[in-house]
Amino acid sequence: MSRRVVMLSMCVAVLSFASPASAQKNGLTPSTAVAPATDAGGHAISAGQAGANSDLATFAYTVTSSRDAITYTGAMVGEDPFGSGFSTTVVDTPVIPVILITNTIAVASPNGKILTTKPGVTVFNPTAPDDVCLKSPNDVPLTLMVQSPLLEAEPFTFGSTDVGTTQYVDAFQRGNFWSLVGGTSYHTILRPHVLPPVVVNLPGKQGLAGSFVGACGPLAIVNFTVMKQQIFNKLLAFESANIDSSKFPIFLFYNTVMAANSAGGSKCCILGFHAAVAAGKKARVQTYAFIDFEASGAFIPSIHDTSIAAHEIGEWMDDPFGNNPTPAWGHTGQVGGCQNNLEVGDPLTGTNVPTVTGANGFAYHLQELAFFSWFYGAPSIAANGWFSDNNTFKTDAGPVCTKH
């Protein structure tokens, strides 16, 4: 891990829910979550502590924000862009498909509330073809994910700047620090490989399968706390598969969202989260993500296929331990109040870059991401002097947010 001091003149809550303005017509509000780093005892730890106790390739940064003149320190994945002699960082990325089985069927009202339930088994399987919500030959969610611009190279241009033929989040990160790394071999690449699927079978109302307005098929709503523990248990089980803290495992779900109370559909819907926790026999801090491949249509027009994956992978790269501090910002994207962390997806939840057609002919949706300089302040060190990778943000986050 390296450290540079950069002078620019220029809660942590586990859950973040979207503002009312972004609510969908069916009453389901898309959002994501972050579970900041904890030690083996479950106690919160800083990014520096987490980085020192993890084998993930990270660097530490220190920046004085022009928004509040306060100095902040955090950690990111990859090589230090404020250094020199750039090269490529490769992070091994196991993709673990999760076959989810729910045992309760829900009848939903037009506003997304659960009216009644009855017993019934529904299987949500990202490894199986779905020719109702998808179209052959691009009908297997897992295959579409692996072939996506998040894990395969595509040409990316931000405005007038060609940032290279590479994976989307690497293109974002190059654009993020373009004034420092432009034209160099600076890259942070994910090396994916698919592991055998795991099965999660949720009894009773811990998981519901419901049909909602605009959806082509059922949507699973699962209890957030239960699912987070289920994924953690699967993570521990995968130690025998040689997963360690140098790697970034992605648990891939299909048409599956989480709620604080799945039985009533309340505070729904969390479509992804990333987390960092000291796990296993070595108690090293392990990062991982829960990602929904969304094809149900319940969140149109903003959330499709890999838009949540772009959100979560982008946030993992720039805030791997979920606790990089920033001046408070808010009232944008999924954040209705104030937030003070470097979660690059949250300010733009529901806003995508132009679709990218993969080599398979599938049109992928990728969420727009906010640049480093949007959080810490102008002038921007990003490509074109922008503050987000599709130029939705024309300025930095502005005065420190105070209205929660």
Image (cartoon, rainbow, N blue to C red):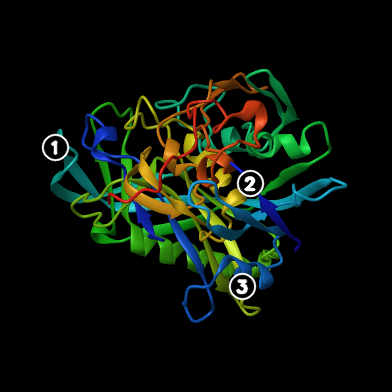
- Residue 86 rendering spot, x and y as whole percentages: 84, 45
Could you say whether the residue bearing mark 2 is in a helix, strand or loop? loop
Question: Label 3 vs label 2: CA separation?
Answer: 25 Å
Question: Label 3 vs label 1: CA separation?
Answer: 46 Å
> For residue 109, which numbered disc appears in the image?
1
Could you say whether the residue bearing mark 3 is in a helix, strand or loop? helix
Which is more N-terminal, label 2 or label 3? 2
Which amino acid, mark 1? Ser
> For residue 49, which numbered disc appears in the image?
3
The residue shown at (60%, 61%) is 73
Q: Which quadrant would the N terminus be assigned to in this image? A: bottom right
Quarter residue 373 falls in = top right
Between circles 3 and 1, the one closer to the viewer is: 3
- Residue 281 rendering spot, x and y as whole percentages: 63, 80
Which is more N-terminal, label 1 or label 3? 3
Question: Which residue lies under the disc numbered 2?
Answer: 8
Classify 98 as above or below 347: below
Which is more N-terminal, label 2 or label 1? 2
Q: Is residue 96 visible?
A: no
Which amino acid, mark 2? Leu
Along the viewing direction, whichever of 99 and 168 lies nearer the viewer:
168
